[in-house]
Image (tube, grey):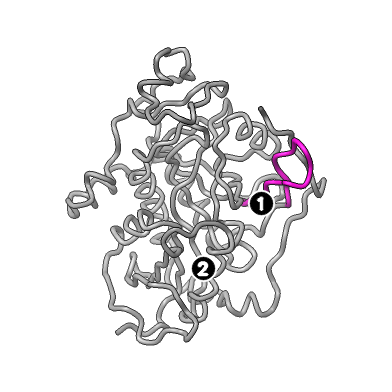
Amino acid sequence: MSNTENYTVGWICAISTERVAAEAFLDEKHEGPENVSTHDNNAYALGKMGRHNVVIAVLPDGEYGTASAATVARDMLHTFPNIRIGLMVGIGGGVPSAEHDIRLGDVVVSAPRNGKGGVFQYEFSKTMQDQAFQQTGFLDQPPTILRTAIAGLKAQYEAEGHQLEEIISDTLAKKRRLQKKYKRPDQSSDRLFQREIVHPADEESCVTVCLDDLSNLQPRHERTEDDDNPTIHYGTIASANQLIKDAKLRDRLAAENDVLCFEMEAAGLMNHFPCLVIRGICDYSDSHKNSDWQGYAAMAAAAYAKELLIRIPPKKIESEKRINDIIMKGELSVYPMVNSVILIEQSR
């Protein structure tokens, strides 16, 4: 059995698809923990990624949102007291715009912008008529050690490009059982609909309903050999307890805060489990939901996370404060909104 004192990197996933992707990139797998805290309900995967001992946990099946993520993180820290850095890695809904050419399979990394943390928390408001969102603030930025690694990896990718697609292909070649669900889907299935086109609630297939008129699609240029594919985007990730399934609402909230991605767990972590959030884009946060890209998006996010980790020397992580100590000393912060509450009218 594995000694829980030896693990310094905590990796949290929301769904089993994300955990499978994370485990696929472990260079070694370890036995389960020797001792588990009495009230720890997590199930763990342990292993080595590069030169780092990593503990991976996933939210309970069927549970989503900020509270569940916070509980998983809390229990992890009880059992693995020496964790120094945290990662939240998985899938999310992208926000393509004129400024950010986000495609399915791309990766969004939480990064501070304009003096604010990389994760933006908002809530759905039910207290005022015709209001959709209550914006509650920007949360603590990722630890310095991770932001420094991001800067180095970003510069490397800009100068040399990256090999994420090759890394994913090599990993799947060794794990053939995963290929059907986790390989990159055909590019023709990456469809961005005009924001006014809403998928009928009683219809299942976009192919037969929403694609009857090709003008329903947002025109986009094809990526060339000189473009990174997947592309890595750095900026603000928005987090709440409900999914965004409306393109108009997506764009209006994104425009207020330059949001690149929506997800459901990070707001429960940032001020209790300082971490970097990495999301592979599996849909466009609109009504045209499908699961075709979930597996590959999870692989892309996990591949980037591993690339980031292997840049950091183990001694650098070991010299970081334990997350438990940071929490005990109250060293985490919240970035307040300039306007503490901004409400955006709901589209109809």
Q: Is residue 119 magenta?
A: yes
Range of the magenta residues?
117-136
Sequence-first tag of 1 and 2: 2
> Is residue 131 rendered to the left or right of residue 324?
right
The residue sitting at the right extreme is: 339
Left or right of residue 210, residue 266 in this image: right
- Residue 229 as seen in the image, left or right of residue 139: left
- Note whether 163 is above or below 42 in the view shown: above
Query: Dot 2, how many residues are within 10 Å of its Cα: few (below 14), some (14-19), or many (20+)?
Result: many
197 inside magenta stretch = no
Above or below, comparing residue 101 to residue 336 in the picture: above
Instruction: Identify which residue is drawn at 69% across, 52% down.
Output: 138
Tell me residue 287's x, y (percent).
Answer: 50, 32
In depth, the one of 202 and 216 nearer the eye is 202
Secondary structure, mark 1, is strand
Between the residue at mark 1 and the residue at mark 2, the CA separation in whole angstroms equals 21 Å
Q: Residue at x 74, y 38 (%)?
A: 131
User: What amino acid is labelled 1 in the image?
Assistant: Gln
Where is residue 303 shown, x and y percent of the image? 36, 52
Numbered circle sitting on residue 121 = 1
Residue pointed to by mark 2: 85
Give whichever of 249, 162 is nearer the camera. 249
